[in-house]
Amino acid sequence: YSEEQTTEDYLFKIVLVGDSAVGKSNLLARFARDEFYPNSKSTIGVEFQTQKMEINGKEIKAQIWDTAGQERFRAVTSAYYRGAVGALLVYDISRRQTFANISRWLNELHTHSDMNVVTILVGNKSDLKDAREVSTAEGKGLAEAEGLFFIETSALDSSNVAAAFQTVVREIYNILS
Ligand code: GDP
Ligand code: MG
Protein backbone atom coordinates (compact mmCIF):
# COMPACT_ATOMS: atom_id res chain seq x y z
CA TYR A 1 0.00 0.00 0.00
CA SER A 2 1.17 3.45 -0.86
CA GLU A 3 -1.06 5.50 1.39
CA GLU A 4 0.31 8.71 2.76
CA GLN A 5 -0.08 9.06 6.47
CA THR A 6 0.51 11.77 9.00
CA THR A 7 -0.21 11.53 12.70
CA GLU A 8 -3.73 12.80 12.12
CA ASP A 9 -4.96 11.60 8.83
CA TYR A 10 -4.86 9.18 5.98
CA LEU A 11 -5.00 9.75 2.25
CA PHE A 12 -6.38 6.91 0.16
CA LYS A 13 -6.32 6.97 -3.62
CA ILE A 14 -9.43 5.35 -5.05
CA VAL A 15 -10.08 4.91 -8.76
CA LEU A 16 -13.34 4.70 -10.71
CA VAL A 17 -13.16 2.07 -13.43
CA GLY A 18 -15.64 0.75 -16.00
CA ASP A 19 -17.13 1.31 -19.43
CA SER A 20 -18.11 4.68 -20.78
CA ALA A 21 -21.51 6.02 -19.62
CA VAL A 22 -22.05 3.58 -16.74
CA GLY A 23 -22.23 6.58 -14.40
CA LYS A 24 -18.75 6.85 -12.90
CA SER A 25 -18.64 10.67 -13.05
CA ASN A 26 -22.14 10.97 -11.65
CA LEU A 27 -21.38 8.62 -8.74
CA LEU A 28 -18.52 10.93 -7.82
CA ALA A 29 -20.60 14.07 -8.37
CA ARG A 30 -23.36 12.64 -6.17
CA PHE A 31 -20.98 11.54 -3.43
CA ALA A 32 -18.72 14.61 -3.32
CA ARG A 33 -21.13 17.41 -4.20
CA ASP A 34 -24.62 15.86 -4.08
CA GLU A 35 -25.10 16.77 -7.73
CA PHE A 36 -26.41 14.86 -10.74
CA TYR A 37 -26.06 15.59 -14.45
CA PRO A 38 -28.88 14.12 -16.57
CA ASN A 39 -26.98 14.54 -19.84
CA SER A 40 -23.40 14.45 -18.74
CA LYS A 41 -20.58 14.33 -21.21
CA SER A 42 -16.95 13.71 -20.44
CA THR A 43 -16.67 17.48 -19.79
CA ILE A 44 -17.63 17.01 -16.15
CA GLY A 45 -14.72 14.64 -15.63
CA VAL A 46 -12.25 16.01 -13.13
CA GLU A 47 -8.87 14.51 -12.44
CA PHE A 48 -9.72 13.71 -8.86
CA GLN A 49 -11.83 14.96 -6.00
CA THR A 50 -10.85 14.77 -2.36
CA GLN A 51 -13.56 13.89 0.10
CA LYS A 52 -13.13 13.94 3.85
CA MET A 53 -14.61 11.05 5.78
CA GLU A 54 -14.48 9.87 9.36
CA ILE A 55 -13.88 6.28 10.42
CA ASN A 56 -13.47 5.35 14.09
CA GLY A 57 -12.88 9.02 14.91
CA LYS A 58 -10.01 9.25 12.42
CA GLU A 59 -10.09 11.71 9.58
CA ILE A 60 -9.67 10.02 6.24
CA LYS A 61 -9.20 11.80 2.96
CA ALA A 62 -10.46 9.79 0.01
CA GLN A 63 -8.83 11.03 -3.16
CA ILE A 64 -11.20 9.72 -5.79
CA TRP A 65 -9.98 9.63 -9.38
CA ASP A 66 -12.29 9.88 -12.36
CA THR A 67 -11.39 9.33 -15.97
CA ALA A 68 -11.85 12.18 -18.43
CA GLY A 69 -13.52 9.81 -20.89
CA GLN A 70 -10.39 7.91 -21.99
CA GLU A 71 -12.17 4.62 -21.26
CA ARG A 72 -14.14 5.12 -24.49
CA PHE A 73 -10.90 4.37 -26.33
CA ARG A 74 -9.69 1.83 -23.75
CA ALA A 75 -6.83 4.21 -23.17
CA VAL A 76 -6.79 4.62 -19.41
CA THR A 77 -3.13 5.15 -18.57
CA SER A 78 -1.09 3.31 -15.97
CA ALA A 79 -0.63 6.64 -14.15
CA TYR A 80 -4.35 6.59 -13.44
CA TYR A 81 -4.04 3.33 -11.48
CA ARG A 82 -0.66 3.99 -9.87
CA GLY A 83 -0.79 4.05 -6.09
CA ALA A 84 -4.49 3.20 -5.90
CA VAL A 85 -5.50 1.34 -2.73
CA GLY A 86 -9.20 1.15 -3.62
CA ALA A 87 -11.33 0.80 -6.74
CA LEU A 88 -14.97 1.00 -7.72
CA LEU A 89 -15.56 -1.28 -10.68
CA VAL A 90 -18.76 0.07 -12.20
CA TYR A 91 -21.26 -1.40 -14.67
CA ASP A 92 -24.74 -0.33 -15.74
CA ILE A 93 -27.47 -2.81 -14.69
CA SER A 94 -29.44 -1.80 -17.81
CA ARG A 95 -26.64 -2.67 -20.28
CA ARG A 96 -25.40 -6.25 -20.16
CA GLN A 97 -22.31 -5.49 -22.23
CA THR A 98 -20.96 -3.23 -19.48
CA PHE A 99 -21.25 -6.19 -17.07
CA ALA A 100 -19.58 -8.54 -19.57
CA ASN A 101 -16.64 -6.11 -19.78
CA ILE A 102 -16.02 -6.14 -16.02
CA SER A 103 -13.49 -8.97 -16.24
CA ARG A 104 -11.43 -6.95 -18.71
CA TRP A 105 -11.45 -3.96 -16.37
CA LEU A 106 -10.48 -6.21 -13.47
CA ASN A 107 -7.53 -7.51 -15.49
CA GLU A 108 -6.47 -4.00 -16.34
CA LEU A 109 -6.75 -2.96 -12.69
CA HIS A 110 -4.62 -5.90 -11.58
CA THR A 111 -2.05 -5.24 -14.31
CA HIS A 112 -1.51 -1.66 -13.21
CA SER A 113 -2.03 -1.72 -9.45
CA ASP A 114 -1.39 -3.76 -6.35
CA MET A 115 -3.25 -7.10 -6.36
CA ASN A 116 -4.56 -6.20 -2.90
CA VAL A 117 -6.40 -3.09 -4.05
CA VAL A 118 -9.74 -3.08 -2.20
CA THR A 119 -12.36 -3.42 -4.91
CA ILE A 120 -16.12 -3.14 -4.93
CA LEU A 121 -18.25 -4.20 -7.88
CA VAL A 122 -20.92 -1.53 -8.39
CA GLY A 123 -24.09 -2.13 -10.39
CA ASN A 124 -25.21 1.44 -11.07
CA LYS A 125 -28.56 2.82 -12.35
CA SER A 126 -30.63 0.64 -10.00
CA ASP A 127 -33.43 3.16 -10.55
CA LEU A 128 -33.90 1.82 -14.12
CA LYS A 129 -36.00 -1.11 -12.91
CA ASP A 130 -37.88 -1.72 -16.16
CA ALA A 131 -34.69 -1.70 -18.23
CA ARG A 132 -32.71 -4.08 -16.02
CA GLU A 133 -30.56 -6.59 -17.96
CA VAL A 134 -28.31 -7.82 -15.14
CA SER A 135 -29.91 -9.35 -12.05
CA THR A 136 -28.72 -8.62 -8.54
CA ALA A 137 -27.89 -12.33 -8.14
CA GLU A 138 -25.59 -12.23 -11.19
CA GLY A 139 -23.76 -9.21 -9.81
CA LYS A 140 -23.38 -10.87 -6.41
CA GLY A 141 -22.21 -14.09 -8.05
CA LEU A 142 -19.45 -12.41 -10.01
CA ALA A 143 -18.35 -10.47 -6.93
CA GLU A 144 -18.13 -13.66 -4.88
CA ALA A 145 -16.20 -15.48 -7.61
CA GLU A 146 -13.68 -12.64 -7.87
CA GLY A 147 -13.49 -11.82 -4.17
CA LEU A 148 -14.98 -8.35 -4.49
CA PHE A 149 -17.44 -6.41 -2.41
CA PHE A 150 -20.76 -5.80 -4.15
CA ILE A 151 -23.42 -3.09 -4.13
CA GLU A 152 -26.09 -1.70 -6.42
CA THR A 153 -26.37 2.09 -6.58
CA SER A 154 -28.23 4.90 -8.24
CA ALA A 155 -26.46 8.20 -8.77
CA LEU A 156 -29.85 9.50 -9.92
CA ASP A 157 -31.82 8.80 -6.72
CA SER A 158 -28.71 8.63 -4.46
CA SER A 159 -29.33 5.15 -3.17
CA ASN A 160 -26.24 3.41 -1.79
CA VAL A 161 -23.83 5.93 -3.32
CA ALA A 162 -22.21 6.93 -0.02
CA ALA A 163 -22.27 3.30 1.11
CA ALA A 164 -20.29 2.21 -1.96
CA PHE A 165 -17.45 4.64 -1.24
CA GLN A 166 -17.62 4.06 2.54
CA THR A 167 -17.34 0.29 2.15
CA VAL A 168 -14.06 0.69 0.27
CA VAL A 169 -12.64 3.31 2.62
CA ARG A 170 -13.59 1.36 5.76
CA GLU A 171 -11.99 -1.83 4.43
CA ILE A 172 -8.76 -0.04 3.47
CA TYR A 173 -8.68 1.49 6.93
CA ASN A 174 -9.27 -1.91 8.56
CA ILE A 175 -6.41 -3.47 6.60
CA LEU A 176 -4.03 -0.69 7.58
CA SER A 177 -4.94 -0.41 11.25
P1 GDP B 1 -19.32 7.82 -17.11
O1 GDP B 1 -18.99 7.90 -18.57
O2 GDP B 1 -19.16 6.42 -16.59
O3 GDP B 1 -18.60 8.83 -16.29
O4 GDP B 1 -20.91 8.09 -16.98
P2 GDP B 1 -21.65 9.47 -16.63
O5 GDP B 1 -21.57 9.75 -15.16
O6 GDP B 1 -21.18 10.54 -17.53
O7 GDP B 1 -23.16 9.06 -16.93
C1 GDP B 1 -23.56 8.64 -18.22
C2 GDP B 1 -25.06 8.87 -18.38
O8 GDP B 1 -25.78 8.05 -17.48
C3 GDP B 1 -25.49 10.31 -18.10
O9 GDP B 1 -26.52 10.66 -19.01
C4 GDP B 1 -26.02 10.24 -16.69
O10 GDP B 1 -27.00 11.20 -16.43
C5 GDP B 1 -26.61 8.83 -16.64
N1 GDP B 1 -26.57 8.25 -15.29
C6 GDP B 1 -25.51 8.16 -14.45
N2 GDP B 1 -25.85 7.54 -13.30
C7 GDP B 1 -27.16 7.22 -13.42
C8 GDP B 1 -28.10 6.53 -12.56
O11 GDP B 1 -27.81 6.09 -11.43
N3 GDP B 1 -29.37 6.36 -13.04
C9 GDP B 1 -29.75 6.82 -14.28
N4 GDP B 1 -31.02 6.61 -14.66
N5 GDP B 1 -28.89 7.47 -15.10
C10 GDP B 1 -27.61 7.66 -14.68
MG1 MG C 1 -17.11 10.14 -16.87
Image (spheres, rainbow, N blue to C red):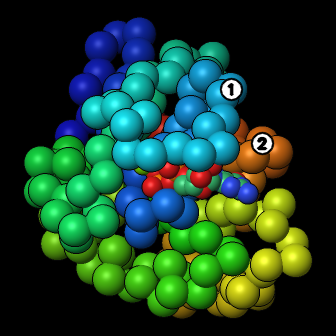
Q: Decide if residue 174 is in sight here.
A: no
Residue depicted at 44% across the width and 80% down the height:
102
Query: Relative to the observer, which residue lies in front, 115 or 73?
Result: 73
| In the depicted structure, whether residue 39 falls above or below residue 131 | above
What residue did someone put label 2 on? Answer: 158
Identity of the amino acid at label 2?
A: Ser
| Residue drawn 87% across the image and 77% down it | 130
Q: Name the residue: 75% across, 46% down.
A: 156
Tell me the quarter of the picture where residue 23 sits.
Answer: bottom right
Extreme residue in the top direction? 8
Residue occupying image coordinates x 53% and y 38%: 28
| Residue 176 placement (x, y as % from top left) | 40, 41
Marks 2 and 1 in Cβ contact (< 8 Å):
yes
- Disc 1 target residue: 34
Question: What is the residue that sits farthest to the right in this orientation?
Answer: 130
Residue type at mark 1: give it. Asp
Nearer-the-camera pick, 70 or 52: 70
Mark 1 nearby-residue class (10 Å; few <14, some 14–19, many ≥20): few
Q: Is residue 129 left or right of residue 48?
A: right
Residue situated in front as seen by the camera: 98 or 57: 98
